[in-house]
Amino acid sequence: MNRKKILGSHVKRLLSGVSDHGKRHLSEVETDLLQTNLLLEEAIEKLSRNFMAIHEAVDAQQATIRLLLDGGTPSAEDKANLAAMNGQVGTYVNAAITSMQFQDMTSQLIDRTLKRVTGLREFLATLGAHGAEMDPDSDSEQMVELLGKVSMALAIQSLELRNVLRKAVSQKHLESGDIELF
């Protein structure tokens, strides 16, 4: 085999290999991100159950409050429960809101990451398609021309991906920012 054929064969193998390998790994990343999203949905379901538990605890307090309003005397245990519950309910509500804010931010990041993975997979598919076009018998001029086409196509896809991936999450810390609950 002469030098040109060896070069063409190596470039073709390289482009196709990078494409196949990258697509396979990005598909796995995409699957992991989808699973992460399912886990976050489960976490939100747990938050909902915790809100219901808070509601039940407040309901339990209402019995003692009704007793007081009716002129009754609460037991020492009722008094201790009322005092402790006031702080606990506030803490639970704050933690739940923070967790909901975290879920929202995480969902936005996952969505952006999925767009990036899809774009990168398309990027690699373009690389593989151009690699498949390469003939190992091509002369240096043909290879240079094809590699120029590959570079241009990949640059265009890269710009398109960058435009799709505008900054989705601007908040840097969980403690700051606003969320809309309903």
Image (cartoon, helix red, strand yellow):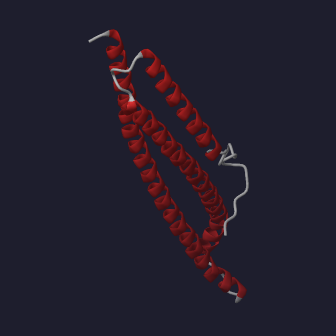
Q: 154 and 149: which one is in front? A: 149
Going by the picture, which residue comes out furthest to the top?
Answer: 3
The total number of labels drawn is 0
Q: Is residue 175 left or right of residue 111?
A: right
Q: Is residue 75 left or right of residue 132?
A: right
* In this view, 154 is above or below 14: below
Where residue 130 sits in the image (x, y, percent)? 43, 33
Q: Residue at x 58, y 32 (%)?
A: 155
Where residue 166 sits in the image (x, y, percent)? 66, 45
Going by the picture, which residue comes out furthest to the left?
Answer: 1
Q: Residue at x 65, y 85 (%)?
A: 67
Q: 120 and 105: which one is in front? A: 120
Q: Is residue 71 left or right of residue 44?
A: right
Where residue 160 sits in the image (x, y, percent)? 60, 42
Q: 147 and 41: which one is in front? A: 147
Q: Residue at x 57, y 55 (%)?
A: 103
Q: Is residue 109 left or right of residue 166?
A: left
Where residue 131 sits in the image (x, y, percent)? 39, 30
The quadrant of the rendering that contains the C terminus is bottom right
The quadrant of the rendering that contains the N terminus is top left
Residue 61 sits in which quadrant? bottom right
* In this view, 64 is above or below 17: below
